[in-house]
Amino acid sequence: MQIPKRYSDYTKQELLDEIKELTAQAIKAEQMDMINELEVLLRKKTMAEAYLLNPEDFKANEVYELIQEPGVLFSITYMNGIFAWGTKSTGNEEIGVPISLLKKPGTL
């Protein structure tokens, strides 16, 4: 049995290919109304996208907007790999989110 390769071991091109494949699979799952499968594929895509970004570009005590929740801000407390840990502007609970879900407020 072969152990699956981790996204952290992928090359940039392998990540881009994986994202393309996951996008195609997600479209198919959505067309077939396979909502659970769609959610899994979208989460995998988000993780693969995070590995294309540089975690050093995201800093503690900076505020970002959550891509999936327009208008909701996320304040980073600390970084752990490709995950930013902090709090949403809508609550006090500390959560971790992949950096691919963050953007600077006011950017597209």
Image (cartoon, rainbow, N blue to C red):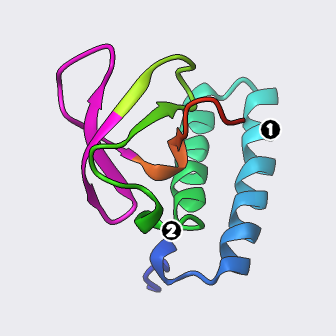
Q: Residue at x 18, y 20 (%)?
A: 92
User: Taking 3 as reference, is 41 left or right?
Assistant: right
Question: Quarter-wise, where is residue 11 in the image?
Answer: bottom right
In the figure, 35 relative to 100: above or below? above
> What residue do we see at 50% from left, 68% from top?
54
Residue under circle 2?
54
Q: Is residue 81 magenta?
A: yes
- Res 85 visible: yes
Say whether residue 6 is visible. Answer: no
Q: Position of residue 87 (x, y in %)?
A: 26, 30
Residue found 61% across the figure and 26% down from its top: 35
* Main SS class of the magenta portion in the image: strand
Which segment is the magenta one?
75-97
Circles 1, 2 touching at the beta carbon (< 8 Å): no
Q: Amino acid at mark 1?
A: Ile
Dot 1: few (<14), some (14–19), or many (≥20) neighbours within 10 Å? some
Quarter in which the N terminus is drawn:
bottom left
Query: In the rendered image, which residue does mark 1 sit on?
Result: 27
